[in-house]
Amino acid sequence: MATNPTITYVAKVGSQIRIGFKLAPSGLYVAGGDIVNLATAAADPLFVGAIPAVEALGPPLSIDIWSNGGNITTVYVPVLGTNPSNSKVKGYSALTTEFTGAAAYPASALADTIVGEATFNNL
């Protein structure tokens, strides 16, 4: 998936930082999940925080992705990466039916507001 993430907020919570983001699917879906590259993500127009960047050492501790548009026909499943640039999101049109690889995103995903949060250890 060309997910084209934008960072919506950066918040320090104890010894961790939480990065909020939006995903805008475009192009063709990649079977097995599309990359969510937070290392090069731009600031969302409504960004909240000081610096719209992942300032962390190491991989994300967790990542969650969900529909914020009330889409109940599409399921998004995050796959934890080994660094800020290689987590993935898998898309499903039913609980066991992944989006078709090398095909355009379904209309339900293109019309959706897809958001998420990744948690990292602070520098």
Image (cartoon, rainbow, N blue to C red):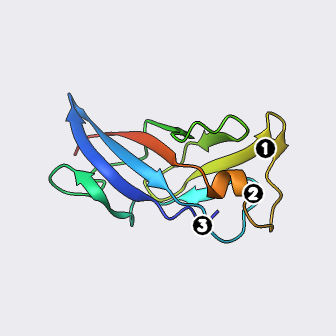
Q: Residue 117 location, x and y as percent?
A: 42, 40
Tag 2 secondary structure? loop
Q: Nearer the viewer, residue 31 or 22?
A: 22
- N-term mark: 3 or 1: 3
**In the rendered structure, are the residues bearing label 1 and label 2 in contact, judged by CB atoms less than 8 Å apart?**
yes
To which quarter of the image does residue 77 belong? top right
Q: Which residue is rendered at x = 19% and y = 57% of the image?
A: 51
Q: Which residue has dot 1 on it? A: 93
Tag 1 secondary structure? strand
Q: Amino acid at mark 2?
A: Pro
Quote the CA–CA distance across marks 1 and 2: 8 Å
Q: Which residue is rendered at x = 39% and y = 61% of the image?
A: 39
Quote the CA–CA distance across marks 3 and 1: 18 Å
Q: Residue 20 location, x and y as percent?
A: 36, 45
Q: Is residue 101 left or right of residue 6?
A: right
Q: Which residue has dot 3 on it? A: 2
Instruction: Assess disc 3: are there few (<14), some (14-19) or many (≥20) residues with their C-alpha within 10 Å of its C-alpha.
Output: some
Q: Nearer the viewer, residue 97 or 46?
A: 46
Q: Which residue is rendered at x = 48% and y = 60% of the image?
A: 37
Q: Foreground mark, 3 or 1?
A: 1
Q: How many marks?
A: 3
Quarter of the figure with the N terminus: bottom right
Q: Foreground mark, 2 or 3?
A: 2
Q: Which residue has dot 2 on it? A: 106
Q: Residue 113 location, x and y as percent?
A: 52, 49
- Is 82 placed above or below 110 here? above
